[in-house]
Amino acid sequence: MKIKLFGMAGDIVGSPTISLPASTVDGIKNVAALKAYLYKTYPRLGELSSMAIAVNKSYASEDTSLEPLDEIALIPPVSGG
C-alpha cells in the first residue's frame, strides 16, 4: 500500500510517500485502522489539528474500506489568504 503525503504530513514523516509492507496492510481494513497505525508509527502526525484522507482521489470517512492497491493521500489542513 502506497500513501502520498502532502504539506506538513510529508515534512513530519520526512518523505512524500510511505510504502507499507504486505504484512502490515493485511491488518489495515479501513481508514480508522490506517490512522491508528500512522499515529502509532509517526506520533508527530497527531500534532496536526485535522487531516483529511483521500482514497482513490475521493475524501474518505473513518469507515471507508481499504484495499492493498488503493491510492491513498494524507492531506493536512492548509491556510492561506
Image (cartoon, helix red, strand yellow):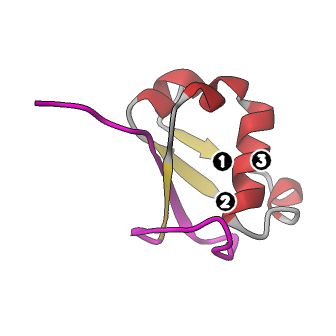
Residue farthest along the left direction in this orientation: 81
| Mark 1 vs mark 2, CA separation in Å | 6 Å
What residue type is disc 3 on? Ala
Looking at marks 3 and 1 on the same chain, the residue that comes earlier in the sequence is marked by 1
The foreground one among 63 and 5 is 63
**Helix, strand or loop for disc 3:** helix
**Residue count near mark 2 (Cα–Cα under 10 Å), binned few <14, some 14–19, many ≥20:** some
Magenta region: 56-81
**Helix, strand or loop for disc 1:** strand
What residue type is disc 2 on? Met
User: Residue under circle 3?
Assistant: 36
**Residue count near mark 1 (Cα–Cα under 10 Å), binned few <14, some 14–19, many ≥20:** few
| Mark 2 vs mark 3, CA separation in Å | 15 Å
User: Residue under circle 2?
Assistant: 1
The label shown at residue 19 is 1
Query: Horizontal and vertical percent for residue 42?
Result: 71, 29
